């Protein structure tokens, strides 16, 4: 699958309510292109403990309000990314119900790396505000957490 390759990371502080997105990637109106996410990395930045976070990757139809993240071009000869990337959301993306793409329980002492089998990448359509967000949840702990995405456009 040829194309330009990018990466971006984002973080957030976990609270006791579901829906604290740490990273979102959505298409922008100006130049819509499909994207294929082929790798995700999840981990805890806070003090680790023997507790489990539930990580979910959801499809979304609106990006919410977040701190902008500038995607890194993995090849400097490529153009800038056509995805809006955000971290540390103060207003959540609009998630599509029953559209969880990935879900993993992960001990806060561990880091997890998901790599797509070729042909099983997470694909976002060439549609305005279509994309996905990465959320972690635990009912009672507060910690800082981080996610990284690598994708092709």
Image: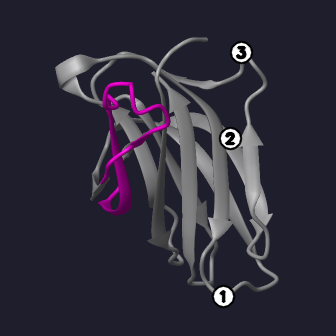
- Number of residues whose C-alpha sits closer than 10 Å to that of mark 1, classed few (under 14), some (14–19) or many (20 or more): few
Q: Quadrant of residue 145?
A: bottom right
Residue at image mark 3:
119
Q: Which residues are magenta?
A: 69-92
Relative image position of residue 16 (x, y in whole percent)? 54, 78
Considering the image in quadrants, where does the C terminus appear? Answer: top left
Against 21, residue 128 (above or below) is: above
Residue at image mark 2:
102
Residue at the spot 65% in from the left edge and 24% down from the top edge:
121
Element assignment for label 3: loop
116 sits left or right of 133 in the view: right
**Measured Cα–Cα span from mark 2 to mark 1:** 25 Å
Residue at image mark 1:
47
Which of 50 and 33 lies nearest the eye of the viewer?
A: 33
**Measured Cα–Cα span from mark 2 to mark 3:** 16 Å
Q: CB of mark 3 within 8 Å of CB of mark 1?
A: no
17 sits left or right of 68 in the view: right
- Number of residues whose C-alpha sits closer than 10 Å to that of mark 3, classed few (under 14), some (14–19) or many (20 or more): few
Q: Quadrant of residue 140?
A: bottom right
Element assignment for label 1: loop
Q: Is residue 141 magenta?
A: no
Residue at the spot 70% in from the left edge and 47% down from the top edge:
103
Considering the image in quadrants, where does the N terminus appear? Answer: top right
Along the polypeptide, which appears first: circle 3 or circle 1?
1
Residue at the spot 56% in from the left edge and 12% down from the top edge:
2
Q: CB of mark 2 within 8 Å of CB of mark 1?
A: no
Relative image position of residue 83 (x, y in whole percent)? 34, 33
Against 15, residue 57 (above or below) is: above
Along the polypeptide, which appears first: circle 2 or circle 1?
1
**Measured Cα–Cα span from mark 3 to mark 1:** 37 Å
**Where residue 13 is drawn, which disc sits there?**
none
7 sits left or right of 117 in the view: left
């Amino acid at each position: 699958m040829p194309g330009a390759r990018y990466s971006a990371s984002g973080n957030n502080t976990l609270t006791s309510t579901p829906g604290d997105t740490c990273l979102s990637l959505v298409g922008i109106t100006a130049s819509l292109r499909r994207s294929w996410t082929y790798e995700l990395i999840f981990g805890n930045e806070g003090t680790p403990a023997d507790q489990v976070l539930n990580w979910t990757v959801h499809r979304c139809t609106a990006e919410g309000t977040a701190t902008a993240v500038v995607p890194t071009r993995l090849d400097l000869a490529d153009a800038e990314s056509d995805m809006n990337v955000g971290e540390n959301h103060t207003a959540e993306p609009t998630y599509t119900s029953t559209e969880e793409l990935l879900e993993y329980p992960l001990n806060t002492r561990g880091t997890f790396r998901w790599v797509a089998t070729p042909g099983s990448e997470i694909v976002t359509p060439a549609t305005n505000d279509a994309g996905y967000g990465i959320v972690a949840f635990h009912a009672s702990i507060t910690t800082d957490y981080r996610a990284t995405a690598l994708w092709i456009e």
